[in-house]
Image (cartoon, rainbow, N blue to C red):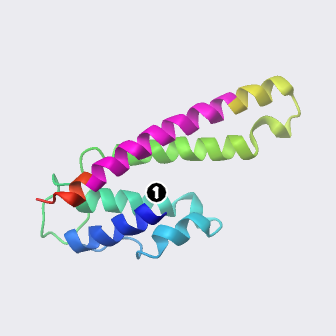
Amino acid sequence: MRWLWLARTNAEVIEPARHRHSPMWAVLGWIVPIVSFWFPQMVVQDVWNAVNPQRPRGTWQLYRTPGAELVTWWWAAYLTNQVLSTSGARLTGDATITRYSDTVAAVALVVAAVLIIKISTRITAWQTNPR
């Protein structure tokens, strides 16, 4: 959350285009029920689009930029892990299905971790060396 707060704040300095959510949602988006299913992804997506050097500057618009699909894939993997690890097949009571669900949740978590490392590294590099 701290990294996202700083990245969101920096993104507004680098590119003052209007973001969908204020910087406070970089933190609150993770903990407020219901909106936590999509706000963090939207904040990361806006940061990505704001600081991506391939985006034209001075347009005051946050257009989708190349590579932004990484954020979508990260969020899909993260939500898959969250849903399967909290509910998954436990509702059926079948041990085989529960084991399968746990395995898929673990794989989704690894995929989400790899993707967010890649995303945060790239955003940090763009913010450190803006064009």
Q: Residue at x 34, y 62 (%)?
A: 46
Magenta segment: 103-124
Residue closer to the observer: 61 or 6: 6
Residue 113 part of the magenta segment:
yes
- Per the image, the residue denoted by label 1 is 41
Point 20% across, 69% down: residue: 14
Q: Position of residue 13 (x, y in %)?
A: 23, 74
Residue at the top extreme? 96
Which residue is at a point 79% across and 30% down the rendered structure image? Answer: 98
In the visual, does 13 lie left or right of 26? left
Residue 20 lies left or right of residue 51; in this view the side is: right
Q: Nearer the viewer, residue 63 or 75?
A: 75
Q: Position of residue 37 (x, y in %)?
A: 58, 58
Q: Residues within 10 Å of mark 1 (few under 14, many from 20)?
A: many
- Tag 1: amino acid: Gln
- Say whether residue 2 is magenta: no
Residue 18, above or below 130:
below
The part of the image, by quadrant, that contains residue 28 is bottom right
Which residue sits at x=46%, y=44%? 74
Along the horizontal axis of the image, is 120 left or right of 100? left
Can residue 15 be seen?
Answer: no
Q: Total marks drawn?
A: 1
The secondary structure making up most of the magenta span is: helix
As helix, strand or loop, the secondary structure at mark 1 comes to helix
The quarter of the picture where residue 105 lies is top right
Residue 96 rendering spot, x and y as whole percentages:
81, 23
Which residue is more in the foreground, 81 or 18? 81
Q: Is residue 50 visible?
A: yes
Whether 91 is drawn above or below 104: the answer is below
